[in-house]
Amino acid sequence: MKIKFKLLALLLFCTILPLAVNVFVSYDSINQRLKSELIAQYKSQADRLNQSFELSIRGMDNNMLSIYQTAELYNFVTESQHAGEEAIAKQRRVENLLKILTHSLNDFSNVYLYRDADHRMFKVNAKFLDVRNEQVPETDNPAWIEETKRHDGNLVVVRNASAESDQPLLFVGRSIPDVIEKMQAGVIGIDLGGTYFQNMLGKDFIVENTEIRDADGTVIYSTLKEPPDAKDQLEIVSETNVYGWTVATFLSKATLQEIAWDAVKPTLLWGAAFLLVGIVLWLMLSRQISVPIYGLVKRMREVGKGDFSLAGWKPKRERRDEIGFLELQFRSMVERIEALIKREYELKMSESVAQMRALQSQINPHFLYNTLTSIYSEALEAGADNVCKMVKSLSAMFRYTTDHQNDIVTLSAEVDHIRNYLAIQKYRFEDRLEFRIDIPNHLETAPMLKLSLQPIVENAFVHGISRSGHGKIAIEAHETDGSVVLTVSDSAGTLDEREADQLTRQVRESGSLGTSVGLANVHKRVQYLFPGSDGIAIKAIHGKTSVSISWRTEAAS
Protein backbone atom coordinates (compact mmCIF):
# COMPACT_ATOMS: atom_id res chain seq x y z
CA MET A 1 0.00 0.00 0.00
CA LYS A 2 1.32 3.41 -0.96
CA ILE A 3 2.00 6.04 1.69
CA LYS A 4 -0.85 8.30 0.58
CA PHE A 5 -3.36 5.45 0.92
CA LYS A 6 -1.95 4.59 4.33
CA LEU A 7 -2.45 8.23 5.33
CA LEU A 8 -6.02 8.07 3.98
CA ALA A 9 -6.70 4.85 5.89
CA LEU A 10 -5.30 6.45 9.06
CA LEU A 11 -7.44 9.55 8.49
CA LEU A 12 -10.59 7.48 7.97
CA PHE A 13 -9.81 5.34 11.02
CA CYS A 14 -9.11 8.38 13.22
CA THR A 15 -12.26 10.17 11.98
CA ILE A 16 -14.93 7.57 11.32
CA LEU A 17 -14.25 5.39 14.37
CA PRO A 18 -14.49 8.26 16.94
CA LEU A 19 -17.49 9.66 15.03
CA ALA A 20 -19.25 6.29 15.01
CA VAL A 21 -18.49 5.75 18.70
CA ASN A 22 -19.67 9.28 19.52
CA VAL A 23 -22.88 8.90 17.50
CA PHE A 24 -23.59 5.49 19.01
CA VAL A 25 -22.89 6.62 22.59
CA SER A 26 -24.83 9.88 22.10
CA TYR A 27 -27.73 8.06 20.48
CA ASP A 28 -27.87 5.47 23.25
CA SER A 29 -27.47 8.12 25.96
CA ILE A 30 -30.16 10.39 24.49
CA ASN A 31 -32.45 7.42 23.92
CA GLN A 32 -32.07 6.23 27.51
CA ARG A 33 -32.40 9.74 28.98
CA LEU A 34 -35.37 10.53 26.77
CA LYS A 35 -36.93 7.20 27.67
CA SER A 36 -36.54 7.91 31.39
CA GLU A 37 -37.87 11.46 31.04
CA LEU A 38 -40.86 10.46 28.91
CA ILE A 39 -41.68 7.52 31.17
CA ALA A 40 -41.59 9.85 34.16
CA GLN A 41 -43.71 12.41 32.29
CA TYR A 42 -46.25 9.84 31.10
CA LYS A 43 -46.38 8.28 34.57
CA SER A 44 -46.99 11.69 36.15
CA GLN A 45 -49.75 12.49 33.67
CA ALA A 46 -51.32 9.06 34.12
CA ASP A 47 -51.29 9.49 37.91
CA ARG A 48 -52.75 12.96 37.54
CA LEU A 49 -55.48 11.67 35.22
CA ASN A 50 -56.31 8.82 37.55
CA GLN A 51 -56.59 11.28 40.42
CA SER A 52 -58.79 13.46 38.23
CA PHE A 53 -61.11 10.49 37.70
CA GLU A 54 -61.20 9.93 41.44
CA LEU A 55 -61.93 13.59 42.19
CA SER A 56 -64.53 13.76 39.43
CA ILE A 57 -66.44 10.73 40.72
CA ARG A 58 -66.11 12.04 44.27
CA GLY A 59 -67.62 15.34 43.10
CA MET A 60 -70.48 13.50 41.46
CA ASP A 61 -71.01 11.62 44.70
CA ASN A 62 -71.09 14.87 46.67
CA ASN A 63 -73.68 16.28 44.30
CA MET A 64 -75.65 13.10 44.55
CA LEU A 65 -75.49 13.20 48.36
CA SER A 66 -77.05 16.65 48.33
CA ILE A 67 -80.41 15.07 47.40
CA TYR A 68 -79.62 11.58 48.72
CA GLN A 69 -79.76 12.88 52.28
CA THR A 70 -83.06 14.76 51.90
CA ALA A 71 -86.26 13.57 53.64
CA GLU A 72 -88.29 13.99 50.49
CA LEU A 73 -86.18 11.47 48.59
CA TYR A 74 -85.99 9.06 51.52
CA ASN A 75 -89.76 9.14 52.16
CA PHE A 76 -90.56 8.87 48.46
CA VAL A 77 -88.50 5.71 48.15
CA THR A 78 -89.38 4.01 51.45
CA GLU A 79 -93.18 4.65 51.56
CA SER A 80 -95.32 1.85 50.26
CA GLN A 81 -98.41 3.93 49.30
CA HIS A 82 -97.99 5.98 46.11
CA ALA A 83 -101.50 7.09 45.27
CA GLY A 84 -103.41 10.27 45.70
CA GLU A 85 -102.57 13.87 45.26
CA GLU A 86 -100.03 13.89 48.07
CA ALA A 87 -98.09 11.10 46.43
CA ILE A 88 -98.16 12.97 43.13
CA ALA A 89 -96.86 16.10 44.87
CA LYS A 90 -94.02 14.12 46.47
CA GLN A 91 -93.13 12.67 43.09
CA ARG A 92 -93.03 16.16 41.58
CA ARG A 93 -90.67 17.32 44.33
CA VAL A 94 -88.42 14.30 43.82
CA GLU A 95 -88.36 14.83 40.05
CA ASN A 96 -87.30 18.42 40.67
CA LEU A 97 -84.52 17.19 42.93
CA LEU A 98 -83.33 14.89 40.14
CA LYS A 99 -83.38 17.80 37.69
CA ILE A 100 -81.41 19.90 40.15
CA LEU A 101 -78.85 17.09 40.33
CA THR A 102 -78.57 16.97 36.55
CA HIS A 103 -77.80 20.72 36.47
CA SER A 104 -74.87 20.20 38.86
CA LEU A 105 -73.27 17.43 36.76
CA ASN A 106 -71.15 17.44 33.63
CA ASP A 107 -70.40 14.80 31.03
CA PHE A 108 -72.97 12.28 32.23
CA SER A 109 -75.51 10.27 30.28
CA ASN A 110 -78.46 9.75 32.65
CA VAL A 111 -79.50 10.20 36.26
CA TYR A 112 -81.47 7.30 37.73
CA LEU A 113 -83.73 6.77 40.73
CA TYR A 114 -85.02 3.24 41.23
CA ARG A 115 -87.76 2.48 43.72
CA ASP A 116 -87.73 -1.15 44.74
CA ALA A 117 -91.32 -1.21 46.17
CA ASP A 118 -93.02 -0.93 42.79
CA HIS A 119 -89.96 -1.60 40.54
CA ARG A 120 -90.26 1.82 39.03
CA MET A 121 -87.30 3.60 37.36
CA PHE A 122 -87.12 7.40 37.14
CA LYS A 123 -84.68 8.54 34.47
CA VAL A 124 -83.43 12.03 33.58
CA ASN A 125 -81.64 12.20 30.20
CA ALA A 126 -78.67 14.60 30.03
CA LYS A 127 -79.61 15.77 26.54
CA PHE A 128 -83.34 16.48 27.03
CA LEU A 129 -83.47 16.99 30.83
CA ASP A 130 -86.93 15.45 31.01
CA VAL A 131 -87.99 12.96 33.69
CA ARG A 132 -89.33 9.66 32.54
CA ASN A 133 -90.49 6.81 34.69
CA GLU A 134 -91.37 3.31 33.74
CA GLN A 135 -92.14 -0.02 35.32
CA VAL A 136 -89.16 -2.37 35.21
CA PRO A 137 -89.89 -6.04 35.73
CA GLU A 138 -87.82 -7.50 38.50
CA THR A 139 -86.40 -10.05 36.11
CA ASP A 140 -85.20 -7.25 33.79
CA ASN A 141 -83.46 -5.15 36.45
CA PRO A 142 -80.06 -3.86 35.25
CA ALA A 143 -77.11 -5.64 36.82
CA TRP A 144 -75.86 -2.45 38.45
CA ILE A 145 -79.02 -2.24 40.60
CA GLU A 146 -78.32 -5.50 42.40
CA GLU A 147 -74.59 -4.72 42.59
CA THR A 148 -75.32 -1.35 44.21
CA LYS A 149 -77.85 -2.76 46.67
CA ARG A 150 -75.25 -5.23 47.97
CA HIS A 151 -73.02 -2.37 49.24
CA ASP A 152 -75.62 -1.12 51.74
CA GLY A 153 -75.59 2.59 50.91
CA ASN A 154 -71.89 2.97 50.12
CA LEU A 155 -70.71 4.52 46.89
CA VAL A 156 -70.41 1.98 44.10
CA VAL A 157 -68.78 2.26 40.68
CA VAL A 158 -70.05 -0.53 38.46
CA ARG A 159 -68.80 -1.29 34.96
CA ASN A 160 -71.40 -2.06 32.37
CA ALA A 161 -70.07 -5.33 30.99
CA SER A 162 -72.48 -5.43 28.06
CA ALA A 163 -72.10 -1.81 27.04
CA GLU A 164 -71.46 -1.03 23.41
CA SER A 165 -69.67 2.02 22.06
CA ASP A 166 -72.84 4.18 22.15
CA GLN A 167 -74.04 2.99 25.57
CA PRO A 168 -73.03 4.04 29.11
CA LEU A 169 -69.82 2.46 30.34
CA LEU A 170 -70.08 3.02 34.11
CA PHE A 171 -72.71 3.42 36.77
CA VAL A 172 -71.94 5.49 39.88
CA GLY A 173 -74.50 5.29 42.62
CA ARG A 174 -75.68 4.45 46.12
CA SER A 175 -78.44 2.26 47.47
CA ILE A 176 -81.15 3.83 49.66
CA PRO A 177 -81.71 1.65 52.75
CA ASP A 178 -84.93 1.54 54.77
CA VAL A 179 -83.59 1.91 58.28
CA ILE A 180 -86.85 0.76 59.84
CA GLU A 181 -87.42 -2.31 57.73
CA LYS A 182 -83.69 -3.07 57.51
CA MET A 183 -83.78 -3.51 53.79
CA GLN A 184 -82.69 -1.72 50.59
CA ALA A 185 -85.54 0.43 49.32
CA GLY A 186 -84.03 1.84 46.16
CA VAL A 187 -80.98 3.03 44.21
CA ILE A 188 -79.92 6.46 43.03
CA GLY A 189 -77.09 6.86 40.54
CA ILE A 190 -75.49 8.34 37.45
CA ASP A 191 -74.22 6.54 34.39
CA LEU A 192 -71.21 7.72 32.41
CA GLY A 193 -70.61 7.20 28.70
CA GLY A 194 -67.68 7.65 26.34
CA THR A 195 -68.13 11.42 26.28
CA TYR A 196 -67.13 11.62 29.92
CA PHE A 197 -63.79 9.88 29.30
CA GLN A 198 -63.14 11.81 26.10
CA ASN A 199 -63.59 15.10 27.88
CA MET A 200 -61.43 14.01 30.79
CA LEU A 201 -58.62 12.92 28.48
CA GLY A 202 -58.93 16.00 26.32
CA LYS A 203 -58.59 18.30 29.28
CA ASP A 204 -55.55 16.85 30.95
CA PHE A 205 -53.86 14.15 28.97
CA ILE A 206 -52.59 12.76 25.71
CA VAL A 207 -55.60 11.25 23.97
CA GLU A 208 -53.74 8.65 21.92
CA ASN A 209 -52.62 5.30 23.30
CA THR A 210 -54.47 5.42 26.63
CA GLU A 211 -56.47 2.78 28.53
CA ILE A 212 -58.55 3.13 31.72
CA ARG A 213 -58.77 -0.15 33.61
CA ASP A 214 -60.81 -1.22 36.61
CA ALA A 215 -59.63 -3.18 39.66
CA ASP A 216 -59.81 -6.46 37.71
CA GLY A 217 -57.59 -5.10 34.97
CA THR A 218 -60.48 -4.99 32.53
CA VAL A 219 -60.37 -2.08 30.12
CA ILE A 220 -63.14 0.44 30.85
CA TYR A 221 -62.23 2.87 28.13
CA SER A 222 -59.48 2.88 25.48
CA THR A 223 -58.26 5.20 22.71
CA LEU A 224 -56.14 2.49 21.09
CA LYS A 225 -57.03 1.71 17.52
CA GLU A 226 -55.42 -1.72 17.74
CA PRO A 227 -54.00 -3.92 20.51
CA PRO A 228 -50.54 -2.73 21.65
CA ASP A 229 -47.45 -4.75 20.70
CA ALA A 230 -45.10 -5.21 23.64
CA LYS A 231 -42.09 -5.28 21.25
CA ASP A 232 -42.86 -1.83 19.84
CA GLN A 233 -44.57 -0.15 22.80
CA LEU A 234 -43.57 0.70 26.37
CA GLU A 235 -46.48 0.33 28.81
CA ILE A 236 -46.67 2.94 31.59
CA VAL A 237 -49.26 2.35 34.34
CA SER A 238 -50.39 4.82 36.98
CA GLU A 239 -50.91 4.22 40.67
CA THR A 240 -54.26 2.67 41.68
CA ASN A 241 -56.91 5.10 42.93
CA VAL A 242 -59.49 4.40 45.67
CA TYR A 243 -61.80 2.72 43.18
CA GLY A 244 -59.09 0.34 41.99
CA TRP A 245 -58.71 2.11 38.68
CA THR A 246 -55.43 2.45 36.79
CA VAL A 247 -54.54 4.48 33.73
CA ALA A 248 -52.18 2.84 31.22
CA THR A 249 -50.42 4.72 28.44
CA PHE A 250 -48.17 3.37 25.71
CA LEU A 251 -45.00 5.03 24.45
CA SER A 252 -43.80 4.09 20.97
CA LYS A 253 -40.16 2.88 20.85
CA ALA A 254 -40.00 4.08 17.23
CA THR A 255 -40.87 7.58 18.40
CA LEU A 256 -38.06 7.46 20.96
CA GLN A 257 -35.58 6.30 18.33
CA GLU A 258 -36.71 8.98 15.90
CA ILE A 259 -36.29 11.72 18.49
CA ALA A 260 -32.86 10.36 19.51
CA TRP A 261 -31.80 10.13 15.87
CA ASP A 262 -32.89 13.73 15.25
CA ALA A 263 -30.76 14.74 18.24
CA VAL A 264 -27.57 13.04 16.97
CA LYS A 265 -28.10 13.91 13.32
CA PRO A 266 -26.31 17.32 13.65
CA THR A 267 -23.32 15.53 15.18
CA LEU A 268 -23.25 13.14 12.25
CA LEU A 269 -23.51 15.98 9.74
CA TRP A 270 -20.70 17.91 11.44
CA GLY A 271 -18.62 14.74 11.51
CA ALA A 272 -19.16 14.25 7.78
CA ALA A 273 -18.18 17.87 7.17
CA PHE A 274 -14.98 17.44 9.22
CA LEU A 275 -14.27 14.23 7.31
CA LEU A 276 -14.52 16.09 4.01
CA VAL A 277 -12.19 18.78 5.33
CA GLY A 278 -9.81 16.04 6.47
CA ILE A 279 -9.84 14.46 3.01
CA VAL A 280 -9.01 17.83 1.43
CA LEU A 281 -6.16 18.27 3.90
CA TRP A 282 -5.05 14.70 3.11
CA LEU A 283 -4.89 15.53 -0.58
CA MET A 284 -2.79 18.60 0.15
CA LEU A 285 -0.55 16.74 2.59
CA SER A 286 -0.09 13.78 0.26
CA ARG A 287 1.09 16.15 -2.47
CA GLN A 288 3.57 17.64 -0.04
CA ILE A 289 4.88 14.29 1.22
CA SER A 290 4.06 11.36 -1.04
CA VAL A 291 4.82 13.01 -4.42
CA PRO A 292 8.42 13.94 -3.48
CA ILE A 293 8.89 10.49 -1.93
CA TYR A 294 7.59 8.83 -5.12
CA GLY A 295 10.09 10.87 -7.11
CA LEU A 296 12.86 9.80 -4.74
CA VAL A 297 11.79 6.15 -5.00
CA LYS A 298 11.78 6.41 -8.81
CA ARG A 299 15.33 7.75 -8.77
CA MET A 300 16.38 4.96 -6.39
CA ARG A 301 15.01 2.37 -8.80
CA GLU A 302 16.90 3.96 -11.67
CA VAL A 303 20.08 3.95 -9.59
CA GLY A 304 19.38 0.31 -8.71
CA LYS A 305 19.34 -0.44 -12.44
CA GLY A 306 22.74 1.20 -12.83
CA ASP A 307 21.77 4.70 -13.99
CA PHE A 308 23.91 7.11 -11.91
CA SER A 309 23.67 10.02 -14.30
CA LEU A 310 20.96 11.96 -12.37
CA ALA A 311 20.12 13.55 -15.72
CA GLY A 312 16.89 15.53 -15.65
CA TRP A 313 16.43 15.03 -11.93
CA LYS A 314 15.96 18.35 -10.30
CA PRO A 315 13.42 19.05 -7.52
CA LYS A 316 10.77 21.62 -8.40
CA ARG A 317 11.80 23.63 -5.39
CA GLU A 318 14.32 23.41 -2.62
CA ARG A 319 12.84 21.94 0.53
CA ARG A 320 14.23 22.57 3.98
CA ASP A 321 12.42 19.77 5.76
CA GLU A 322 13.35 16.10 6.24
CA ILE A 323 12.31 15.17 2.68
CA GLY A 324 14.54 17.90 1.27
CA PHE A 325 17.39 16.57 3.41
CA LEU A 326 16.79 13.05 2.05
CA GLU A 327 16.80 14.32 -1.53
CA LEU A 328 20.02 16.25 -0.96
CA GLN A 329 21.76 13.35 0.77
CA PHE A 330 20.62 10.84 -1.86
CA ARG A 331 21.87 13.06 -4.67
CA SER A 332 25.20 13.47 -2.89
CA MET A 333 25.40 9.71 -2.29
CA VAL A 334 24.71 8.92 -5.96
CA GLU A 335 27.35 11.41 -7.04
CA ARG A 336 29.88 9.81 -4.70
CA ILE A 337 28.96 6.32 -5.91
CA GLU A 338 29.34 7.46 -9.50
CA ALA A 339 32.76 8.94 -8.70
CA LEU A 340 33.82 5.73 -6.92
CA ILE A 341 32.68 3.61 -9.86
CA LYS A 342 34.57 5.86 -12.26
CA ARG A 343 37.65 5.69 -10.06
CA GLU A 344 37.37 1.91 -9.83
CA TYR A 345 37.03 1.71 -13.59
CA GLU A 346 40.07 3.89 -14.13
CA LEU A 347 42.13 1.84 -11.68
CA LYS A 348 41.13 -1.38 -13.41
CA MET A 349 42.02 0.16 -16.75
CA SER A 350 45.33 1.35 -15.29
CA GLU A 351 46.07 -2.13 -14.05
CA SER A 352 45.18 -3.59 -17.45
CA VAL A 353 47.43 -1.10 -19.23
CA ALA A 354 50.28 -1.88 -16.84
CA GLN A 355 49.87 -5.58 -17.38
CA MET A 356 49.68 -5.12 -21.14
CA ARG A 357 52.83 -3.04 -21.13
CA ALA A 358 54.51 -5.60 -18.95
CA LEU A 359 53.46 -8.34 -21.33
CA GLN A 360 54.74 -6.33 -24.28
CA SER A 361 58.09 -5.98 -22.55
CA GLN A 362 58.47 -9.74 -22.05
CA ILE A 363 58.66 -10.90 -25.66
CA ASN A 364 59.43 -14.53 -25.23
CA PRO A 365 61.09 -14.16 -21.75
CA HIS A 366 62.65 -17.60 -21.87
CA PHE A 367 64.36 -16.69 -25.16
CA LEU A 368 65.63 -13.46 -23.56
CA TYR A 369 66.81 -15.31 -20.43
CA ASN A 370 68.67 -17.89 -22.55
CA THR A 371 70.17 -15.15 -24.76
CA LEU A 372 71.30 -13.11 -21.74
CA THR A 373 72.76 -16.25 -20.18
CA SER A 374 74.74 -16.94 -23.38
CA ILE A 375 75.99 -13.35 -23.47
CA TYR A 376 76.95 -13.60 -19.82
CA SER A 377 78.93 -16.81 -20.51
CA GLU A 378 80.74 -15.34 -23.54
CA ALA A 379 81.57 -12.16 -21.60
CA LEU A 380 82.79 -14.18 -18.67
CA GLU A 381 85.12 -16.28 -20.93
CA ALA A 382 86.32 -13.10 -22.62
CA GLY A 383 87.05 -11.51 -19.23
CA ALA A 384 84.60 -8.62 -19.81
CA ASP A 385 83.62 -8.13 -16.18
CA ASN A 386 81.61 -4.96 -16.80
CA VAL A 387 79.58 -6.67 -19.48
CA CYS A 388 78.93 -9.56 -17.09
CA LYS A 389 77.68 -7.18 -14.43
CA MET A 390 75.42 -5.32 -16.87
CA VAL A 391 73.96 -8.57 -18.26
CA LYS A 392 73.40 -9.88 -14.73
CA SER A 393 71.58 -6.69 -13.66
CA LEU A 394 69.50 -6.65 -16.83
CA SER A 395 68.57 -10.31 -16.37
CA ALA A 396 67.43 -9.60 -12.78
CA MET A 397 65.30 -6.67 -14.01
CA PHE A 398 63.62 -8.80 -16.68
CA ARG A 399 62.94 -11.53 -14.18
CA TYR A 400 61.38 -9.02 -11.74
CA THR A 401 59.21 -7.21 -14.28
CA THR A 402 57.89 -10.39 -15.91
CA ASP A 403 56.75 -11.91 -12.61
CA HIS A 404 53.01 -11.04 -12.43
CA GLN A 405 51.99 -13.12 -9.45
CA ASN A 406 51.75 -10.24 -6.94
CA ASP A 407 51.06 -6.52 -7.20
CA ILE A 408 52.40 -5.93 -3.68
CA VAL A 409 56.05 -6.72 -2.85
CA THR A 410 58.43 -5.81 -0.05
CA LEU A 411 60.24 -2.50 -0.07
CA SER A 412 63.59 -4.31 -0.24
CA ALA A 413 62.56 -6.20 -3.42
CA GLU A 414 61.50 -2.96 -5.12
CA VAL A 415 64.74 -1.26 -4.05
CA ASP A 416 66.85 -4.19 -5.37
CA HIS A 417 65.09 -3.82 -8.72
CA ILE A 418 65.92 -0.10 -8.80
CA ARG A 419 69.47 -0.82 -7.74
CA ASN A 420 69.93 -3.05 -10.84
CA TYR A 421 68.37 -0.30 -12.99
CA LEU A 422 70.74 2.33 -11.56
CA ALA A 423 73.73 0.00 -12.00
CA ILE A 424 72.96 -0.26 -15.73
CA GLN A 425 72.53 3.51 -15.99
CA LYS A 426 75.85 3.93 -14.17
CA TYR A 427 77.66 2.10 -16.97
CA ARG A 428 76.00 4.54 -19.38
CA PHE A 429 76.77 7.77 -17.55
CA GLU A 430 79.93 6.57 -15.72
CA ASP A 431 81.23 9.37 -13.48
CA ARG A 432 78.46 11.78 -14.46
CA LEU A 433 75.98 9.80 -12.35
CA GLU A 434 76.00 9.30 -8.61
CA PHE A 435 73.24 7.61 -6.61
CA ARG A 436 72.61 6.84 -2.97
CA ILE A 437 70.01 4.50 -1.42
CA ASP A 438 69.19 4.89 2.26
CA ILE A 439 66.51 2.48 3.54
CA PRO A 440 66.21 1.76 7.29
CA ASN A 441 66.36 -1.93 8.12
CA HIS A 442 62.95 -2.03 9.83
CA LEU A 443 61.26 -0.79 6.62
CA GLU A 444 62.76 -3.37 4.29
CA THR A 445 59.85 -5.77 4.88
CA ALA A 446 57.19 -3.06 4.49
CA PRO A 447 54.61 -3.85 1.73
CA MET A 448 54.88 -1.70 -1.38
CA LEU A 449 53.30 -1.40 -4.82
CA LYS A 450 55.36 -3.32 -7.38
CA LEU A 451 57.01 -1.24 -10.15
CA SER A 452 56.01 1.99 -8.43
CA LEU A 453 59.56 3.26 -7.89
CA GLN A 454 60.97 2.71 -11.40
CA PRO A 455 58.69 5.36 -13.13
CA ILE A 456 59.83 7.93 -10.57
CA VAL A 457 63.54 7.13 -11.10
CA GLU A 458 63.05 7.09 -14.88
CA ASN A 459 61.52 10.58 -14.71
CA ALA A 460 64.63 11.74 -12.83
CA PHE A 461 66.80 10.50 -15.72
CA VAL A 462 64.54 11.64 -18.57
CA HIS A 463 63.74 15.13 -17.24
CA GLY A 464 66.78 15.74 -15.11
CA ILE A 465 70.12 14.05 -15.58
CA SER A 466 69.70 13.39 -19.35
CA ARG A 467 69.13 17.09 -19.94
CA SER A 468 71.92 18.37 -17.70
CA GLY A 469 74.32 15.57 -18.60
CA HIS A 470 75.18 14.78 -14.94
CA GLY A 471 73.62 14.63 -11.52
CA LYS A 472 73.00 12.88 -8.24
CA ILE A 473 70.02 10.68 -7.33
CA ALA A 474 69.14 9.94 -3.72
CA ILE A 475 66.53 7.41 -2.60
CA GLU A 476 65.44 7.66 1.03
CA ALA A 477 62.64 6.16 3.11
CA HIS A 478 61.14 6.98 6.49
CA GLU A 479 57.98 6.27 8.43
CA THR A 480 55.53 8.87 9.77
CA ASP A 481 52.01 8.55 11.29
CA GLY A 482 51.52 4.97 10.08
CA SER A 483 52.65 5.77 6.52
CA VAL A 484 55.88 4.95 4.67
CA VAL A 485 57.30 7.83 2.63
CA LEU A 486 59.81 7.02 -0.13
CA THR A 487 61.52 10.05 -1.69
CA VAL A 488 63.52 10.17 -4.95
CA SER A 489 65.45 13.41 -5.39
CA ASP A 490 67.80 14.58 -8.11
CA SER A 491 70.14 17.56 -8.34
CA ALA A 492 69.26 18.54 -11.91
CA GLY A 493 66.85 21.24 -10.72
CA THR A 494 64.78 21.47 -13.92
CA LEU A 495 61.55 22.48 -12.09
CA ASP A 496 60.62 25.48 -9.99
CA GLU A 497 58.11 25.43 -7.11
CA ARG A 498 55.14 26.57 -9.24
CA GLU A 499 55.80 23.92 -11.88
CA ALA A 500 56.23 21.25 -9.21
CA ASP A 501 52.87 22.14 -7.61
CA GLN A 502 51.15 22.19 -11.02
CA LEU A 503 52.61 18.80 -11.92
CA THR A 504 51.44 17.35 -8.59
CA ARG A 505 47.86 18.50 -9.29
CA GLN A 506 47.98 17.04 -12.79
CA VAL A 507 49.17 13.69 -11.45
CA ARG A 508 46.51 13.56 -8.73
CA GLU A 509 43.62 14.90 -10.82
CA SER A 510 44.43 13.15 -14.09
CA GLY A 511 41.44 11.24 -15.50
CA SER A 512 43.27 9.82 -18.48
CA LEU A 513 46.20 7.45 -18.02
CA GLY A 514 47.45 7.48 -21.61
CA THR A 515 49.43 4.57 -22.99
CA SER A 516 52.42 4.60 -20.60
CA VAL A 517 52.90 3.52 -17.05
CA GLY A 518 53.50 6.94 -15.50
CA LEU A 519 53.25 8.84 -12.27
CA ALA A 520 49.44 9.19 -12.54
CA ASN A 521 49.18 5.41 -12.86
CA VAL A 522 51.34 4.89 -9.80
CA HIS A 523 49.35 7.46 -7.80
CA LYS A 524 45.96 5.91 -8.57
CA ARG A 525 47.16 2.34 -7.98
CA VAL A 526 48.65 3.32 -4.62
CA GLN A 527 45.34 4.91 -3.51
CA TYR A 528 43.44 1.90 -4.73
CA LEU A 529 45.62 -0.75 -3.06
CA PHE A 530 46.40 1.36 0.03
CA PRO A 531 43.16 3.30 0.82
CA GLY A 532 43.70 6.58 2.60
CA SER A 533 47.22 7.07 1.24
CA ASP A 534 48.54 10.43 0.00
CA GLY A 535 50.22 8.97 -3.12
CA ILE A 536 52.53 11.05 -5.31
CA ALA A 537 53.84 14.51 -4.33
CA ILE A 538 56.38 16.60 -6.31
CA LYS A 539 58.47 19.40 -4.78
CA ALA A 540 61.23 21.71 -5.99
CA ILE A 541 63.40 23.23 -3.22
CA HIS A 542 66.79 24.97 -3.55
CA GLY A 543 67.52 23.61 -7.02
CA LYS A 544 66.51 20.06 -6.18
CA THR A 545 63.54 18.16 -7.53
CA SER A 546 62.07 15.49 -5.26
CA VAL A 547 59.26 13.06 -5.97
CA SER A 548 57.81 11.28 -2.93
CA ILE A 549 55.36 8.43 -2.73
CA SER A 550 53.46 7.88 0.52
CA TRP A 551 51.29 4.89 1.41
CA ARG A 552 49.66 3.50 4.54
CA THR A 553 51.03 0.04 5.16
CA GLU A 554 48.23 -1.09 7.49
CA ALA A 555 45.59 -0.32 4.82
CA ALA A 556 46.89 -2.78 2.22
CA SER A 557 43.99 -4.47 0.37
Image (spheres, rainbow, N blue to C red):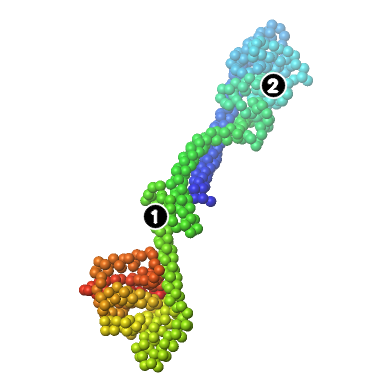
Q: Which mark is residue 165?
A: 2
Q: Residue at x 40, y 47 (%)?
A: 316
Q: Residue at x 55, y 37 (%)?
A: 31
> Earlier along the polypeptide chain: callout 1 or callout 2?
2
Residue 557 occupies quadrant: bottom left
Q: Is residue 218 above or below residue 379?
A: above
Is residue 97 shown to the viewer in this render? no
| Image location of residue 425, percent across then percent down | 33, 81
Along the viewing direction, whichever of 388 and 548 lies nearer the viewer: 388
* 282 horizontally vs 518: left or right: right
**Could you say which is closer to the camera, residue 263 or residue 501?**
501
Image quarter of residue 244: top right
Q: Which residue is mark 1?
A: 328
Q: Residue at x 45, y 80 (%)?
A: 403
Give me the C-alpha separation between circle 1 and circle 2.
94 Å
Amino acid carrying mark 1 in the image: Leu
Q: Nearer the viewer, residue 363 or 382?
A: 382
Residue 175 in percent (x, y) is at: 67, 22
Q: Secondary structure at mark 1?
A: helix
Crowding at dot 2, Cα within 10 Å, few <14 / some 14-19 / many 20+, comes out as: few
Tell me the quarter of the picture where residue 48 sits: top right
- The numbered mark at residue 399 is none
Q: Percent from the top left, x then y, of residue 16?
A: 52, 43
Q: For mark 1, does the 10 Å Cα neighbourhood hold few (<14), some (14 to 19), or many (20 or more) residues?
A: some
Please tell me which residue lies in front, 301 or 266.
301
